[in-house]
């Protein structure tokens, strides 16, 4: 794909060299902290992807027991994950992505939380009808693209300094140690308010899904 110069170097290499000093100013992207972040973050997103695809399958086959089990896995997984992202990754990304894009990432979490409350209601019901299964599938499909969007952020993390990436990894350790599941974290620990995004949905869904969130 890349054109070769007379010296045999690819255009991609030349471009990388030209922009190297400027863009890579924040970090090398290759320190042990960067490599570790890439590894753990990718692994977490893969797990989350599998849980969500499993949930879609459980809804498609109206497997209520399976859906309910996967839903708790989803909450246990996303509690610490969303937490360390919001506490360190998102603020550190502001310098690179800008405030608007970071706000978008936080909004995606807001919506996933509201959807999770409703999924909790659906998966804890006595039976799973066709309508509920369709609704559940729709909600899971809405969460799914955030997984790949979020996984792609690793390429931006490469632009951070080693110390910044270490801060993210330490926050991750802390969140995993506290181990607060998604809906409990959202209602008791998370400082962010739903005021500017899904406030009405959040409270309405909580009312409907009594006992969840
Ligand atoms: Fe993520
Ligand atoms: Fe995220």
Image: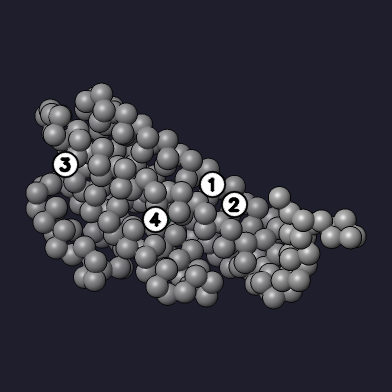
Seen in the picture, residue 211 relative to 200 is either above or below; the reply is above
Seen in the picture, residue 66 relative to 96 is either above or below; the reply is above
Distance from disc 1 to disc 2, alpha carbons, whole Å, reads 6 Å
Mark 3, secondary structure of its residue: helix
- Sequence-wise first label, 4 or 1: 1
Q: Position of residue 95 (x, y in %)?
A: 52, 75
- Residue 177 visible to the viewer: no
The residue under the point 22% across, 42% down is 119
Distance from disc 4 to disc 1, alpha carbons, whole Å, reads 14 Å
Q: Tags 1 and 2 in contact by the CB under 8 Å rule?
A: yes
Count of numbered circles on the image: 4
Disc 2 beta carbon < 8 A from ligand 1? Answer: no
Distance from disc 4 to disc 3, alpha carbons, whole Å, reads 21 Å
Q: Position of residue 58 (x, y in %)?
A: 28, 28
The residue under the point 12% across, 47% down is 209
Q: Residues within 10 Å of mark 4 (few under 14, many from 20)?
A: many
Mark 4, secondary structure of its residue: helix
Q: Which mark is residue 121?
A: 3
Mark 2, secondary structure of its residue: helix
- Sequence-wise first label, 1 or 3: 1
Q: Is residue 25 left or right of residue 109?
A: right
Q: Tags 1 and 3 in contact by the CB under 8 Å rule?
A: no
Residue placed most toward the observer, 48 or 24 = 24
Query: What residue does disc 4 label?
Result: 82
- Sequence-wise first label, 4 or 3: 4
Query: What residue does disc 2 label?
Result: 38
Query: What residue does disc 1 label?
Result: 42
Disc 4 beta carbon < 8 A from ligand 2? Answer: yes
- Sequence-wise first label, 3 or 2: 2
């Amino acid at each position: 794909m890349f054109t070769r110069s007379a010296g045999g170097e690819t255009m991609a290499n030349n471009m990388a060299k030209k922009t190297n000093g400027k863009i890579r100013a924040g970090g090398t992207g290759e320190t042990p902290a960067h490599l570790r972040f890439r590894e753990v973050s990718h692994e977490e997103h893969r797990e989350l992807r599998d849980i969500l695809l499993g949930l879609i399958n459980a809804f498609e086959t109206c497997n209520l027991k399976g859906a309910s089990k996967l839903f708790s896995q989803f909450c246990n997984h996303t509690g610490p994950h969303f937490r360390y992202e919001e506490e360190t990754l998102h603020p550190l990304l502001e310098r690179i992505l800008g405030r608007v894009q970071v706000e978008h990432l936080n909004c995606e979490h807001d919506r996933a939380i509201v959807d999770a409350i409703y999924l909790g209601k659906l998966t804890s019901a006595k039976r799973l009808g066709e309508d509920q299964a369709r609704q559940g599938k729709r909600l899971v499909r809405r969460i799914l693209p955030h997984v790949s969007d979020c996984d792609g952020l690793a390429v931006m993390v490469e632009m951070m300094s080693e110390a910044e990436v270490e801060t993210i990894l330490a926050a991750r350790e802390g969140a995993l140690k506290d181990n607060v599941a998604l809906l409990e974290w959202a209602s008791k620990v998370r400082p962010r308010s739903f005021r500017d995004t899904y406030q009405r949905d959040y409270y309405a869904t909580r009312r409907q899904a009594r006992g969840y969130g």
